[in-house]
Every structure is written in structure tokens, then in C-alpha cells.
């Protein structure tokens, strides 16, 4: 379905023009860049004794800044140039906070339109002029990608996400957008799952102006494998899934997709078939694409795979959840406030913090 189904004619051109003008306006206002505040490598939400927080972390897990959040956070999106991040509520959420990471102030509060809910993730355009947010129509969970210009963070439109229950979204280097449509219809009040017998998760590839370019679905027998999170490799996309079927069934939780082809599913080795307990929480890939990491908090493991999806290693630690790449390896966070370096040969302690890290560790690539 094209964006014309939910937007008036020529709306996409207007969005592009507004985003361009917003970008020009933003350049007139001097703002600090990531390098000015210590070049943090990651953003991570957590819960401390006095409330919820967002931290900027160095490559070795040291906190460079911390900012209070009004409620539990999930993931965040870092502006490509400015020291600004948008922190999203855990789905289904109703807040997005645009945070000045240099000064610690909240610049803007994002509120989804009436009848919409944020779904935990977002991404900026390469020039930073446009913020895209994963959302659902609260009644029915139809997917939307909200569009916000980043001068005043005013909402200027939306696209159809190409499925039900979008969660993670990523911008490809050429400006196209890939969406993980989880396929699950949820009750807007209590998150009860309403359509497990008929769910159809998919990966949808959108153009930089919102047209559907390609879509990949799972085989019929695996359609209870909700596609949740994404990582980018050179020329392809890795995706992490969460199994909503019988816990006794052996299913792959990692997949690889090259647009224009079918998705490839990547089961772990026989000895680790049930190590993740049907739940892949976060995913990351090294910049060269030679390693992919998948975490499972219920399983208490991080698994490493090569670029073909072959399992390389499985390391155990209770409540591992967030993961992001750095160099040729990964940094992983857990629910006890610890950060770890994860490589083929094991886990190495980096730092400890008096909090519980939440689901994700978001990598920053300051320009």
C-alpha cells in the first residue's frame, strides 16, 4: 500500500519540502555536537533508585551524562549531527522526549495523534531534518510511521508501515527505510495479544518518501515468529524474532534479508536450540557485517553469528538484554547494571552502575 492511502495527494512532496526547510532553519541555530559532550558511543535507558533515566555511555560503558525520564524508557534515536536524542516510552507508549544531551533539558514533548500509540523506536533522516517514529493505530494495531520535522518537532504527516504492529525501524545508507512489522494486534489498554492464530509479521522496505518497495514474509509454519528488531549489514538486513507459539517447538530467532529475495532463517546449533527460550530481545551487527549478536533476557544468553547466520558462540549471563556493536565486537548490558564486552571468546566486564538497564543499547554514529 502506498502512502497515498493515508495522506492527501502531493503530501509526500510537501513533507520533503518542509523537512528541507526545517533543516535549513535548524542550521541557523548553533547546537552542540556529540563530540562536544565526549562523543558517547551509546544511549541506554534504565531504572535507578530514584526513577527512570537515560544515559550516554562511552565505548567502555562509562556514563558521560544521565537525564531523568518521566516513565520507563525503551529505545532512543540519536540525531546524526547534534547532541540531541529522542527517548521513547516502552510500547505501547504515549511519550517521546526530545532531549538536549549537552544541557540535560527536555526540548520538546512528542505526543502521538489521538488514537495512536508510539511503539518504542524511531530513526532520523541522514541530514537530521526528519524524525520517523514507529506507531500503531490503537484500535486494531495497524502500523504507521509518524513524520516530524526537527526544527520545532511538529508532526507533518505519516506513512503506512506496511503491516500490523511495527516495532523497530532503520534507515539504510541510501535513505530507504526498513520496518519490522511484528504482526501482533494488541489491546490498547493492557497489551493483551489478540490475533496470534492469524498473525502475519513482515519486513517492509519503504522509499525515502514512503512508498512500499518490497516486503518479505515468513513461511506459513513460522508466522507466529514476531519480527521485532533490526540490524544493518552491508547489503542486507538482520532481524530478530520472538516466538508466540508452542514453547516446545524449535524455531530460528535470527533471519537475514536481502531486498529482492526471500528471507533466510538461521537456526542455532543443535546444542543451543532452546537457549534463548523463544525470545530474541536485541540485535546488533558489526560495521563490516562479519558478526551478528542476539540477546535473550529470559534465556540469559548472547549468541554470536557470522554474516551467513552460522552460530559462532553462546555466552551466558543473567538478564542480558541490550547490545550494540563497537569495533569488531559488542557491548552488552544486563538487568543488574553491568556492561560487558562480548567477543567470540567470551564476556569481559567493562563497568557497573547502580541501576537496572532496560531493553536496548542504542549505538551512536556521530557525523
Image (cartoon, rainbow, N blue to C red):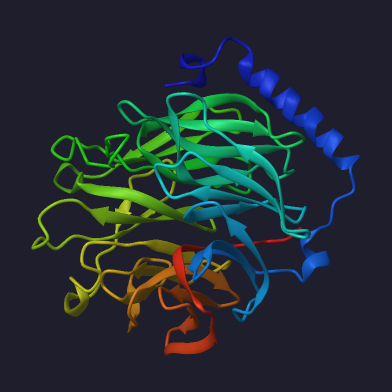
Left or right relative to 166: residue 350: right
Q: Residue at x 47, y 77 (%)?
A: 337
In this view, 58 is above or below 7: below
**Looking at the rendering, which quadrant does residue 210 occupy?**
top right
Q: Residue at x 58, y 47 (%)?
A: 172
The reply to whether residue 356 is in sight is: yes
Left or right relative to 198: residue 330: right
What is the count of numbered marks? 0
Locate the C terminus and report the quarter of the image it occupies: bottom right
**Looking at the rendering, which quadrant does residue 267 occupy?**
bottom left
Asked whether 194 or 48 is in front, the reply is 48
Locate the N terminus and report the quarter of the image it occupies: top left
Q: Residue at x 65, y 69 (%)?
A: 41
Left or right relative to 176: residue 338: left
Left or right relative to 61: residue 64: right
Asked whether 105 or 352 is in front, the reply is 105
The reply to whether residue 362 is in sight is: no
In this view, 5 is above or below 161: above
Q: Position of residue 262 (x, y in %)?
A: 33, 45
Q: Position of residue 167 (x, y in %)?
A: 41, 44
Q: Position of residue 277 (x, y in %)?
A: 21, 67
In this view, 56 is above or below 165: below
In this view, 290 is above or below 132: below
Q: Position of residue 141 (x, y in %)?
A: 33, 31
Asked whether 326 or 41 is in front, the reply is 41
Q: Residue furthest front?
A: 50
Amino acid at each position: 500500500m502506498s502512502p497515498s492511502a493515508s495522506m492527501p495527494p502531493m503530501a509526500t512532496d510537501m513533507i520533503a519540502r518542509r523537512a528541507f526547510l526545517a533543516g535549513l532553519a535548524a542550521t541557523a541555530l548553533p547546537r552542540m555536537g556529540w563530540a562536544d559532550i565526549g562523543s558517547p558511543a551509546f544511549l541506554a535507558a534504565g531504572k535507578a533508585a530514584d526513577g527512570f533515566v537515560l544515559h550516554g555511555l562511552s565505548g567502555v560503558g562509562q556514563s558521560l551524562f544521565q537525564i531523568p525520564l518521566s516513565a520507563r524508557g525503551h529505545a532512543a534515536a540519536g540525531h546524526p549531527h547534534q547532541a540531541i536524542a529522542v527517548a521513547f516510552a516502552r510500547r505501547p507508549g504515549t511519550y517521546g522526549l526530545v532531549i538536549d544531551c549537552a544541557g540535560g533539558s527536555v526540548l520538546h514533548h512528542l505526543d502521538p495523534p489521538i488514537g495512536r500509540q508510539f511503539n518504542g523506536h524511531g530513526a532520523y533522516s541522514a541530514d537530521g531534518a526528519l524524525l520517523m517514529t514507529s506507531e500503531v493505530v490503537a484500535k486494531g494495531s495497524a502500523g504507521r510511521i509518524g513524520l516530524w520535522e526537527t526544527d520545532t518537532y511538529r508532526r507533518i504527516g505519516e506513512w503506512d508501515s506496511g503491516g500490523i504492529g511495527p516495532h523497530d525501524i532503520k534507515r539504510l545508507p541510501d535513505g530507504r527505510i526498513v520496518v519490522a512489522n511484528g504482526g501482533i494486534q494488541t489491546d490498547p489498554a493492557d497489551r493483551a495479544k489478540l490475533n496470534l492464530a492469524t498473525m502475519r509479521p513482515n519486513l517492509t522496505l519503504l522509499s525515502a518518501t514512503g512508498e512500499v518497495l518490497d516486503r518479505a514474509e515468513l513461511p506459513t509454519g513460522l508466522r507466529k515468529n514476531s519480527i521485532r528488531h533490526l540490524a544493518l549489514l552491508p547489503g542486507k538486513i538482520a532481524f530478530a524474532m520472538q516466538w508466540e507459539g508452542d514453547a516446545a517447538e524449535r524455531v530460528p530467532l535470527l533471519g537475514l534479508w536481502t531486498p529482492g529475495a526471500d528471507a533466510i532463517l538461521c537456526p542455532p546449533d543443535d546444542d543451543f536450540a532452546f537457549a534463548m527460550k523463544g525470545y530474541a530481545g536485541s540485535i546488533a551487527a558489526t560495521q563490516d557485517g562479519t558478526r551478528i549478536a542476539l540477546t535473550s533476557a529470559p534465556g540469559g544468553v548472547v549468541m554470536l553469528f557470522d554474516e551467513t547466520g552460522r552460530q559462532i558462540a553462546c555466552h551466558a549471563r543473567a538478564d542480558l538484554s541490550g547490545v550494540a556493536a563497537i569495533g569488531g565486537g559488542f557491548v552488552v548490558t544486563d538487568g543488574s547494571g553491568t556492561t560487558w564486552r562480548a567477543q567470540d571468546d567470551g564476556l569481559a566486564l567493562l563497568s557497573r552502575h547502580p541501576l537496572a538497564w532496560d531493553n536496548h543499547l542504542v549505538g551512536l554514529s556521530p557525523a
